[in-house]
Amino acid sequence: MAAPNKGRRSPAAQGRPGRALVLILVVIAALAGGMLYSGTMAPRLGIDLAGGTSFTLAAQNQPGKPNAINETNMKTAAGIIERRVNGLGVSEAEVQTQGTNHIIVNIPKGTNAKQARQQVGTTAQLGFRTVLTAAAGTKTPSQGASEPPKAGNGDKKKDGAATPTPTGRPTTQGRAVGDALKKDDAPSGSATPTAKTPSMPPAQQQPQGAGIPAALQKKLAALDCSTKESRSAAAEQAARAKPSDPVVACEDDGKTKYALGPVKVEGTDVDDAKATFDQQGGQGWLVQMNFTSAGGKKFADVTGDIASKAPPQNQFAITLDGEVVSAPRVSSAIAGGNAQITGGFTQQSAEDLANMLSYGALPLSFKIADETTVTAALGGEQLTAGLIAGAIGLALVVIYLVAYYRGLSLVALASLVVSAALTYALMTLLGPAIGFALNLPAVCGAIVAIGITADSFIVYFERIRDEIREGRTLRPSVERAWPRARRTILVSDFVSFLAAAVLFIVTVGKVQGFAFTLGLTTLLDVVVVFFFTKPLMTLLAKRKFFHSGHPWSGLDPTRLGAKPPLRRGRRTSAPIETKEA
């Protein structure tokens, strides 16, 4: 008969149900092996369950922008800080505004608190300023600009960036050498970097005809970059200056100080930045920057403008929060909209810098007003209460299955165990993989998923029992019921997954944990029903206990009120086709 054969074709390979069972058991074993290999045997917990660190950031108006603290800028800053923190691999971090000028940042336990503090506390005000003159980092009251210290070949800063001592010597290719910025595949005449920077020739220690204001020269002479405290004070003062004002600034290692012109390219002109390892060029870790179309034009203009000037005025300084992180020089305009920062970076320092640059400059400056450690006591109590409620709900489901479906309840319980094993293993592995953290709403999502999974079993079991009521034996009932149940299960799970996906997209914070867990368990429900429940039922249908309709099998024809058995020679008035509900 054509109709029954149609119903036999399903993803679970009805002729070989054992293969589907072996496949899903192999998947579970592989996930368990992944847990053992990674050394992670439990899911990563969110801040409400494991505790963590909480920062309170207070917004401050920038010079020249007295009305910068508004709702729009606060929301923009919160979004940037959230992306910046998540760039550390942190998930379930809570970033939200409070009042009119505060942002609360909660970071789960297990994150490097010091590193996170630097990320959330740094305003990341990036700017490209022209260099007017340079001097040694110590205070020089007798003259405005003394000779910068000699770095020597290959001299590196402790934090991973090469010492930006200016130089007037071209490379063998006729291009000027910059210590930290380079153009990828640069054409002839563009700036080409090297970590080896010879010292400034004595004749070029003080540029002639620079036209530097006397007041700025005096500030540079009085600037002392020899201590961390003095560098921090100088950076704070430079960061407060207007972009159009000249400033004096220290190199971040304190060896060199600069008098700098106005900002020519702003941090918002940087479209993206990422840390990469240069295997071919031998530069080690570097930061690749891509500018916006407008930023690329500005960058080409400023490099073209200063290229023909005498050192050190053919340099431009990359300043980050008032400190000079690099000061390369160029011989011609760097076009193309991309550049590289190199100079002895470690992987960590390159990733930190790229992370800050990637998410742009904040519209406001912030200071950390408070930092506290969050305990997991309250979350632990709520988790205990939630688990108790979940256990009670699960017990009621089990009692109902056993009382109503009897032997079939064993199939449902085994499927629930497989679903729980897959869910637990995936949640554990997703922690180190994508930073997933299990919080209280996520636990609620997992508990809700028990009902979704049980509902799929009930739909299939009822379809089988309907076929038995029609007078069919168990084996054809299992196969005929599957196409009808399959469609219902897929439609139901699709609706649940769609709701979870929409919830995940339109919400933030902890609610996303609920939506993610609900979506994950809904997908696993489809996998379990197709590759475990259905093949298992196909195998059990051959067992006498179920096939003969034992009273405790849950498939007793008498209890179900079955019609007389259908005979092979019996014909119906119309052809019967298996239709999906």
Image: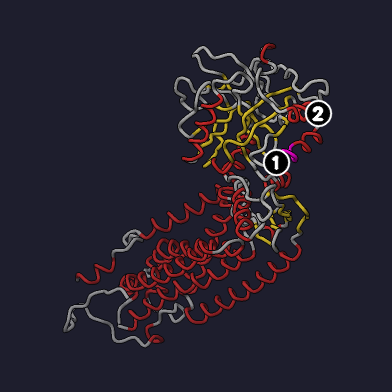
The crowding category of the residue bearing disc 1, from other C-alpha atoms within 10 Å (few below 14, some 14 to 19, many at least 20), is: some
- The residue stretch that appears in magenta: 235-239
**Residue in the image at 38% along x and 79% along y:** 465
Image quadrant where one finds the N terminus: bottom left
Q: Nearer the viewer, residue 338 or 239?
A: 239
Q: Nearer the viewer, residue 547 or 273?
A: 273
The crowding category of the residue bearing disc 2, from other C-alpha atoms within 10 Å (few below 14, some 14 to 19, many at least 20), is: some
**Is residue 432 at least partly visible in the picture?**
yes
Residue 106 vertical position relative to residue 462 in the rendered view, above or below: above
Image quadrant where one finds the C terminus: bottom left
Q: Quickly name the residue at label 1.
A: 241
Measure how far apart labels 1 and 2 are at the Cα level: 18 Å
Q: Quickly name the residue at label 2.
A: 222
Left or right of 213, for residue 454: left
Whether residue 187 appears in magenta in the rendering, the answer is no
Residue 153 vertical position relative to residue 64 in the rendered view, above or below: above
Circle nearer the N terminus (1, 2): 2
Left or right of 89, for residue 290: left
Horizontal and vertical percent position of residue 541: 37, 70
As shown in the figure, which amino acid type bears the numbered disc 1? Ala
Which element is circle 2 on?
A: helix
Q: How many marks?
A: 2
As shown in the figure, which amino acid type bears the numbered disc 2? Ala
Residue 31 vertical position relative to residue 259 in the rendered view, above or below: below
Horizontal and vertical percent position of residue 337: 48, 35
**Is residue 352 at least partly visible in the picture?**
no
Horizontal and vertical percent position of residue 203: 67, 11
